[in-house]
Amino acid sequence: MKTFLITCFCIFITLSVSFAEEKGEEDYWKELKKNVESIKQAQNDPTKEAFWKGEKLNREIGVDELDMFDIGLGHAIAGNNDEAIKTFYSFINKFPKSPLKDDAFSVMNTLLAMD
C-alpha cells in the first residue's frame, strides 16, 4: 500500500504543481471550492445534475464523502497545510473508490510542494 501511495504521489505532484502554477494558487483553490459547491447544490436539489470540473459525475458522492473533502479544502485555503494533508490522506483511505480521490492526491501533492 505504501508503494502505491508513493507512486501516486510522484505522478500527481508533477501534475498538481504544474496545474497550480498555471492557474495561480488562489484560482486553484477557488476552482475546487466551486466544484464542491456545485455538487452540494445537486445534493440539495434533485432536479440538478452533479458536475465535477465540467463533467457530469457518473456516481453519486455521499454527503460524508463531500464534507470530508470540503473540510480538507478549507484547511488548505486557510493555509493549514498539515491539517489539510492529514484530512486528504484520511479521505483517500476512507473513500478509496471516490471520484474525488485523484483530486485529493493532487491537493496533497500541491501542498507538499509548497512546503
Image (cartoon, rainbow, N blue to C red):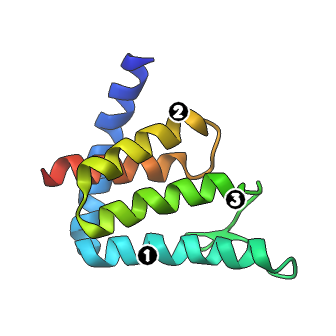
Residue where numbered disc 1 is placed: 31
The answer to whether the residues at label 2 and label 3 have Cβ atoms under 8 Å apart is: no
Residue 87: x and y in percent read 42, 46
Residue drawn at (37%, 17%) of the image = 3
Q: Residues within 10 Å of mark 1 (few under 14, many from 20)?
A: few
Quick one: SS at disc 1? helix
Establish if 47 lies above or below 84: below
Residue where numbered disc 3 is placed: 63
Which sits in the foreground, 17 or 95?
A: 95
Q: Is residue 29 left or right of residue 103?
A: left
Q: Is residue 97 left or right of residue 69?
A: right
Quick one: SS at disc 3? helix
Amino acid beneath label 2: Asn
Q: CA distance from mark 3 to mark 1?
A: 20 Å
Q: Residue furthest left?
A: 115
Residue where numbered disc 2 is placed: 93
- Residue 48 seen in the current view: yes
Q: Earlier in the sequence, mark 3 or mark 1?
A: 1
Residue drawn at (58%, 36%) of the image = 94
Q: CA distance from mark 2 to mark 3?
A: 16 Å
- Residue 49 seen in the current view: no
Q: CA distance from mark 2 to mark 1?
A: 24 Å
Residue drawn at (31%, 49%) of the image = 83
Residue drawn at (15%, 55%) of the image = 114
Residue 43: x and y in percent read 76, 71
Amino acid beneath label 1: Glu
Establish if 85 lies above or below 10: below
Which sits in the foreground, 31 or 84?
A: 84
